[in-house]
Structure formats: structure tokens, C-alpha cells
Amino acid sequence: MDLKLITVLALAVALALGVAGCKSNASDTASLTAVAETGSSEQAAASDENPAGPAAEVETDAARDNNSNEPKPSQPNALPRLASKGATRVEMRNVDFHTEDAIVLRIRALQGALLRTKPSTPPVFDDKRSFALRIDSGTIGIRVDSLAALMNNYVFAYPHAPLKRISISTNGTKIKMSASMHKVVDVPVKIEGDLTATPDGKIRLHPTSIKAAGIPAKGFMHLFGLDLSEVMKANASRGVTLDDNDIIMDPERMMPPPAIRGKVTAVRVEGDEVIQVFGSGKAVAARSSSNYMSYRGGTLRFGKLTMTNADLRIIDADPKNAFDFSIDHYNRQLVAGHSKNTPDFGLVVVMPDYNRLGGESGNRTTGR
């Protein structure tokens, strides 16, 4: 055989063996990497199943808070865990609670706690970001005008949001939403659907009718398209995501400060309100016939006053309708009301309704 031919064949065989060896080494390396990553994932999962942290305890009602089920950061997008140690117990009855002037939570009854968002700082009324309201049990309504304000001013208030200029109404037991969809040219859309609670405590909007510029659409994925769906995914921290052709709303993420922690167990449309039931929804055993908010245990600050082992009760000056309270303007209500100390060193404050002080209010006539 010609010497040049033999040399060429030898080189070809060597090259082939070299390439195969490289592929084998790459495969082995990839396998080892996968095994290492799997081991790390298992260790992380084990760590998440047994999160470190102090047992839940409070100065008042300790047993209840010891059994609290706070969210654990087992996923990258999980909400931060807020310890219940030193929490202030909360009860509310028949309170229209303004988180902002135009966003009002109509609290029929609520039991829960104020949780610190920073371990070193107690809940401060003058800083809504200093605490989260944990709802153990309660029934809360939100009117469609407040819900629309929440969607426009907070949930979809980010660049290139898929929906804007949102208005909301009801049709029997269904929710109706009209909006402009952000495309090359804004497109008017109308959505009607049913609300249900999900097993993990969120709210599902299942559409029964979707129209874009008057033309029926098959579902949200078809309506929004891939580009807007990705925008929503990137802004999932605002509390609204897509699940196939349904919209999932997470009350724990949707609300502006103060944040809430709690799982929705039932939801329904009632008149012009969306009613959310948290936990068992069991009504508070009223301490009196008045509309009130009660804060007990832990440390609480408002204005220049700091209460340790807090014992604060805020009562509606006019119990004929719901107590209209604004966390942003509480001091105006405090100045317009009166207070007294109790024999147990507690404080009772009688306040007029916020919507009677002449300030801007998103709920001037409660109808309750």
C-alpha cells in the first residue's frame, strides 16, 4: 500500500478516536455536573423542608401564633418569611380600611396579627411598610371601583403592562372587566368570567366571554399573545399571572402596603363587591356592638407614642354605619376624636369616620 495513503488513514483513525474521546469526556463531565446539581437541589430541598427560625410566639395569644403557617421561602419568588414572635394580635369588625384613598377593604370581620417586616422595627402606623397584616380568619369585600383603582394604580402600573384604563363591574355572580390592551395600537377588550378560590389560596378568574374590538377571542393566551404574556410573567410580583387561559390573582402580592398575608378559601360576587373569605371566615365574637379595631400584645408605634404589650382599641364614633378608617390619615381622625386610658393601662380612642373629615376618600358613602 502506498505510504502516503497509509499515513492519511492513520491520521483519520487518530482524529476519529480523538473526537470520540472528547465527546465521551464531555458526556462524563455533564453527567458529573448533573449529579452534583441534583445533590445540591436535594440538599436545598431538605433545607427548605426544615427551615431554621424561632418558634412562633407572641406576648398575647401565644398558642394561636405558635401554630401560624407563614409562607416559607422555598422558591425563588416566594414571599419573605415574617416571624410571628412579638406579633400584635388584631381584631376588626365592620371597618372600611383605606390602604390608599381610592383602595378600600370593607372588613366585615377579621382576626389576625401585625407582623414585623424588619425584625428590629415594630409595626408603625406612620410607615405602612413596617408591617404586614396576617389574616387568620376573616371576610373582606372590595367594591368594583376600589378593585379597578387597585388594578390601574398598582397591579398593572408598570411599563408595557398588557392592560390599562381598566374598569370593572358585575353581572349577577360574574365579574366584568373592560380595558385597553397594549399592542401596536391599543385595542379595547371586554372580559366576563367566574371567580373561584384556588387550592393554594389565590383567586382564579375563568373567562366565559372574551372580546377584542368586538371580536371573540379563545382565551387570555390567545388574546395577549406571547409578547404580553411574557411581560406579565416578568412582573408576576404584582400578583397577577396567567394559567393557560385563566388569570390567577394573588391577594398577598396584589395589595400596596401594608401587605397582607392570608389564604383565600372562598370568593363570591355580591352586588358591586367581590367578597373574599380567609381561613374559616369565622366571625369575630364582638366585644361590643360598636365598629372597632383592637390591637393587643407586642410593640406598636403611632406618632410619638410607643406601646409595649400593646392594648389599643379604636372605636367608631358613629356606629350606625361602617367605621371609615384611613391608615394614611389616621392622625387627622385621632385629632378629631378623643381618647381615654383604662385601669389596665390600655388606651381607648374614639374616632370619627375619615370620609366625614372633608378629605379625599374613595368610599364616601359606605352603604353599610
Image (spheres, rainbow, N blue to C red):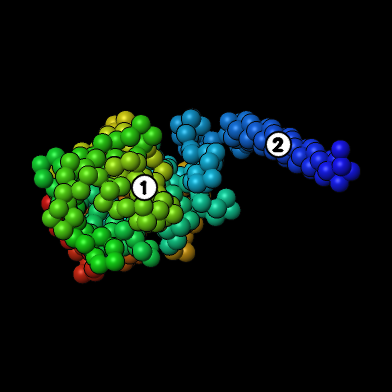
Residue type at numbered disc 2? Ser
- As drawn, the residue found furthest toward the left would be 172
Tag 1 residue: 241
**Residue at the (55%, 38%) spot, across then down:** 74
- Of labels 2 and 1, the one closer to you: 2
Tag 2 residue: 27
As displayed, is residue 215 above or below residue 58? Answer: below
Picture quadrant of residue 317: bottom left
**Residue at the (29%, 66%) spot, across then down:** 184
* Distance between the alpha carbons at the discs numbered 2 and 1: 38 Å
| Crowding at mark 2 (Cα within 10 Å: few <14, some 14-19, many 20+) | few
Q: Where in the figure is residue 1, as x and y percent of width and height? A: 86, 38
Picture quadrant of residue 328: bottom left
Mark 2 secondary-structure assignment:
helix
Position of 233 compared to 81: left or right? Answer: left
Residue type at numbered disc 1? Thr
Q: Nearer the viewer, residue 101 or 66?
A: 101
User: Do residues under tags 2 and 1 come within 8 Å of each other at their CB atoms?
Assistant: no
Position of 18 compared to 144: left or right? Answer: right
Can residue 40 be seen? no
Q: Nearer the viewer, residue 88 or 338?
A: 88
